[in-house]
């Protein structure tokens, strides 16, 4: 398409989305749930079609030399397809937030004032790899009463279009407009440039992908953005940690998956437990092919550690690389996290209640955890059904963004003829 054609195409998409958003906003919960269940059934039925489409994307990605982390995020397996369908069913089972009235109270004038939860309108979602986002985003936006414009990366075009067909089938089965969820068909990056400035048709943009993509969207968008730039996540092992718990958690937080934003990138260990636990963890990591970078104290306990640079402490590797630092105590651990972290997800392993409470209160991140892995920072694991993404912003939505994060509130006032004196 030419630049003129793309602009016209995106304007048409926007107009259709705005019209659909008004229809979906007033749609009954039962109809939305029927659409979600029908989408899930279509995805399960078309498993082989989805795998075949994904195989084309993987073949193209490997031919282009995309890195291992991108390939990992792009890959769809039978388990992932089942997870998409299950996620849609979970969203259908969740309470519908739209129309919920809270805080209703009488004022001295006799009027009642409260708040009603309402859709945001049209949500534009821009993402790389991760074909499952197509189903997750469609389901969450629909249940929250919104229309969605989805723009996946060129590397996942076949997978996304195959999933989009299942989404459209679900919408029509329930009598909803197909345009309630539109997946952009062009891979031209100019489409993104148009989407993020269409203030007449788009209410919120949610970017999901690498730091470069999110920085570009944040800098160029004229529509409000819900985002996180990167996931520099920490696990701090306190001197009063249970040894076995600490080993299991620190292993899982790094090695369960390398290419996700909630994977641990820096391990902090209290000096009083470091001599016992670091050799054990070092062997686990090295046996799994993880490259270790650390400070002098960590190097003294694991000789294979490469000296860490200042840049390492603030790097999201998305790879089998881990930074390790030995700290004097809780104060230094919190200071390190708040200085170098990305306000995404951080965890403490400790049996000391006071230390745990301080960590929860003083670490300024969207998810803060005690005695568990950072890998749980996920909408599905939090019971949200699925997530649009994880927000490290502090206004509107923070942490995994599920149904509530895709809604707003408006004041409602109930009277019985009162007038202001």
Image (cartoon, rainbow, N blue to C red):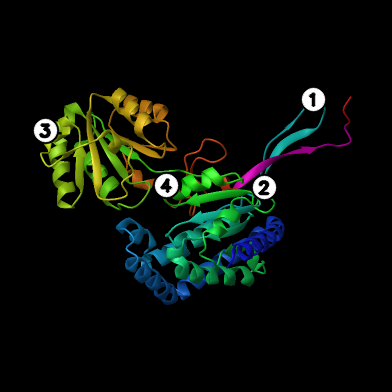
According to the picture, the residue beneath numbered tag 1 turns out to be 108
Can you tell which quarter of the image residue 75 is in? Answer: bottom left
The reply to whether discs 2 and 1 touch (Cβ–Cβ < 8 Å) is: no
Between disc 4 and disc 1, the foreground one is 4
Residue segment shown in magenta: 407-418
Labelled disc at residue 118: 2
Placement of 279 over or under 68, stated as above or below: above
Q: Nearer the viewer, mark 3 or mark 1?
A: 3
Horizontal arrangement in the rendering, residue 281 relative to residue 195 (left or right) = left
Which of 360 and 109 lies nearest the eye of the viewer? 360
In the rendered structure, are the residues bearing label 3 and label 2 in contact, judged by CB atoms less than 8 Å apart?
no
Q: Locate the N terminus by quadrant.
A: bottom right
Residue 226 visible to an observer of this rendering: no
Residue under label 3, please give it.
300
Does residue 353 belong to the magenta stretch? Answer: no
Say which element carries label 3: helix
What percent of the width, then of the height, locates residue 329? 26, 24
Please provide percent x and percent y for residue 296: 16, 31
- Binning the other alpha carbons within 10 Å of mark 3 as few (below 14), some (14 to 19) or many (20 upward) gives some
Give the residue pinned by disc 4.
Answer: 211
């Amino acid at each position: 398409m030419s630049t003129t054609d793309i602009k016209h195409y995106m304007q048409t998409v926007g107009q259709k989305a705005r019209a659909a958003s008004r229809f979906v906003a007033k749609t009954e919960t039962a109809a939305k749930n029927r659409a979600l269940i029908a989408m899930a059934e279509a995805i399960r039925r078309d498993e082989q079609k989805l795998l075949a489409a994904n195989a084309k994307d993987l073949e193209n990605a490997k031919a282009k030399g995309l890195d291992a982390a991108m390939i990992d995020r792009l890959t769809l397996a039978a388990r992932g397809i089942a997870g998409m369908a299950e996620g849609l069913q979970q969203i259908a089972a969740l309470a519908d937030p739209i129309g919920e009235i809270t805080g209703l109270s009488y004022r001295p004038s006799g009027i009642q004032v409260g708040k009603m939860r309402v859709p945001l309108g049209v949500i534009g979602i821009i993402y790389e790899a991760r074909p499952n986002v197509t189903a997750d985003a469609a389901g969450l936006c629909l249940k929250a009463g919104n229309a969605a414009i989805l723009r996946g990366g060129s590397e996942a075009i076949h997978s996304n279009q195959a999933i989009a067909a299942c989404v459209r089938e679900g919408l029509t089965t329930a009598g909803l407009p197909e345009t309630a969820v539109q997946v952009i068909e062009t891979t031209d990056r100019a489409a993104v440039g148009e989407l993020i400035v269409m203030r007449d048709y788009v209410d919120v943009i949610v970017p999901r992908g690498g730091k470069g993509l999110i920085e570009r969207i944040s800098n160029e968008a004229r529509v409000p953005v819900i985002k996180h730039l990167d996931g520099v996540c920490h696990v701090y092992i306190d001197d009063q940690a249970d040894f076995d718990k600490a080993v299991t958690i620190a292993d899982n937080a790094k090695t369960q998956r390398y290419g996700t934003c909630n994977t641990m990138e820096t391990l902090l260990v209290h000096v009083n437990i470091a001599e016992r636990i670091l050799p054990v963890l070092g062997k686990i990591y090295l046996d799994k092919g993880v490259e270790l970078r650390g400070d002098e104290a960590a190097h003294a306990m694991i000789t294979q550690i490469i000296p860490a640079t200042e840049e390492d402490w603030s790097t999201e590797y998305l790879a089998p690389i881990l930074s390790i630092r030995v700290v004097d105590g809780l104060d230094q651990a919190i200071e390190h996290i708040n200085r170098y972290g990305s306000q995404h997800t951080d965890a403490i392993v400790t049996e000391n209640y006071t230390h745990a409470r301080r960590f929860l209160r003083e670490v300024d991140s969207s998810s803060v955890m005690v005695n568990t892995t950072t890998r749980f920072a996920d909408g599905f694991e939090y019971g949200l059904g699925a997530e649009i993404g994880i927000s490290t912003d502090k206004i509107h939505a923070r942490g995994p963004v599920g149904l509530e994060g895709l809604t707003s509130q408006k004041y409602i006032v109930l009277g019985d003829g009162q007038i202001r004196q």
